[in-house]
Amino acid sequence: MLILLAAIFVLHIACIIILLTATIDNAWWVISAGNMPTDIWARWVFVNNSWHSIDLPSTYPESYLQAVQASSVLACIFSIIGIFVFVAQLFTLPKGQRFLVSGVFQFLACLCIMIAASIYTDRFHTNEQSLGSYGHCFILAWIAFALTFLSSIIYFVLRKKTAE
Amino acid sequence: MLTFLALTSVAFLGIVPEQSQAIAIYTGWERHALVGSDIRLSCSFFSWRWTSEDVTFSWTYRPDGSRDSISIFHYTGGAAYVDNKGPFRDRLEFVGNPGRRDGSILLKNLELNDNGTFTCDAKNPPDIVGRPSSVRLLVFEKVPIQAGVITGAIIGVVLGLLVLIVVIYYLMRFLVARRVFSLSVSKHGKKKKEGSQQRQLWTPPPLTCYPLP
């Protein structure tokens, strides 16, 4: 029982770490010419033997970019609140009840990162498939979607047993 | 001690007015406008002296990327002189009130070429020492969304809704609990009253013993 609890806790922490990396590290797309990672906050260029961060070009659809930024930040926030709620529910939930509120927060995080990744996939770099490739943050965002979904399902199904 | 204090205060009174005789001119820092719209560039000043009759305002314009300034407006001797040859002919209007230290101008029908820096210089004789102040004009074809406004709005609204839902949930629980509590108290009170009344009419039932099986 303790191992199951530890595994669920580790899964949730892993979700948080993946979400934070996907949001903060600017590498949703990598431009082949110069291997420059870019999105969603800034772009990295290699000039004079050092990396500089520059603003994203104004040709980006501004409102969609800000929607992606907002929902990925919200996903991180919901997941972090979820871990605290889970720990609180561990101690306060009556026996036999389900971890509903933690599951709700993880589900919201799943929803938000899905919105962010979907908007990004649909609206950005749709005509540039030959000019670059998706970076590690993009892949991490979709992995985070799968993991948070799994985590929320576990919370909805799990019941608090005795001798916790 | 007292004489020392008196001397220092007189010295301060002597020093401060000389420094404060500089005139301070205020304009905006940056103004954004759409092509074809009108914009009012405000200019006012602060001076320790009363507003004199010889107060002057002058505006100069330096286009983006150019080093030369061109004078476009001058107010002196109670009369305003607007640009009638330069880039703003027929588009400039004086909308200020020199009596109230306001030297604002109105630019009409903006074009993309009007991007640049506008400098206002005001003089209030004998208060003439001061720095002119500049305002940068940016003309856009469509209004750009400032970085982060939509992001912040979405995050703020969602978190606000979350807080609202939590607050309402706990409020409902509190109110329902209170209602239940007050109902149970009133029921308990009623029962007690009825019980005390009935005790006078109620006689205990006779004790009967059943034989053990």
Image (cartoon, coloured by chain):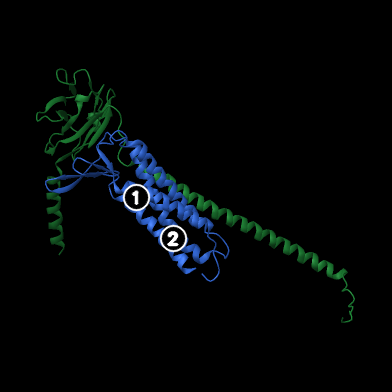
Chain colours: A blue, B green
**Given the image, on which type of amino acid does mark 2 rest?**
Phe
> At 38% from the left edge and 50% from the top edge, which residue is drawn?
A143
Marks 2 and 1, how far apart at CA:
23 Å
Instruction: Please give the chain letter of the residue carrying mark 1.
Output: A
Q: Is residue B59 left or right of residue B170?
A: left
Which residue in the structure is indicated by mark 1? Answer: A140
Which residue in the structure is indicated by mark 2? Answer: A84
Relative vertical location of residue B95 with respect to residue A124 in this rendering, above or below = above
Residue A43 appears in the picture as rendered:
no
Secondary structure, mark 1, is helix
Give the image location of residue B9, x and y in percent.
Answer: 15, 55
Instruction: Please give the chain letter of the residue carrying mark 2.
Output: A
Give the image location of residue B38, x and y in percent.
Answer: 28, 25
**Given the image, on which type of amino acid does mark 1 rest?**
Leu
Q: Quadrant of residue A122?
A: top left
Give the image location of residue A116, x and y in percent.
Answer: 38, 43
Relative vertical location of residue A114 with respect to residue B142 in this rendering, above or below = below
Please rate how many residues cluster around mark 2, counting C-alpha atoms within 10 Å: few if below 14, some from 14 to 19, many from 20: few
Give the image location of residue B140, x and y in percent.
Answer: 26, 29
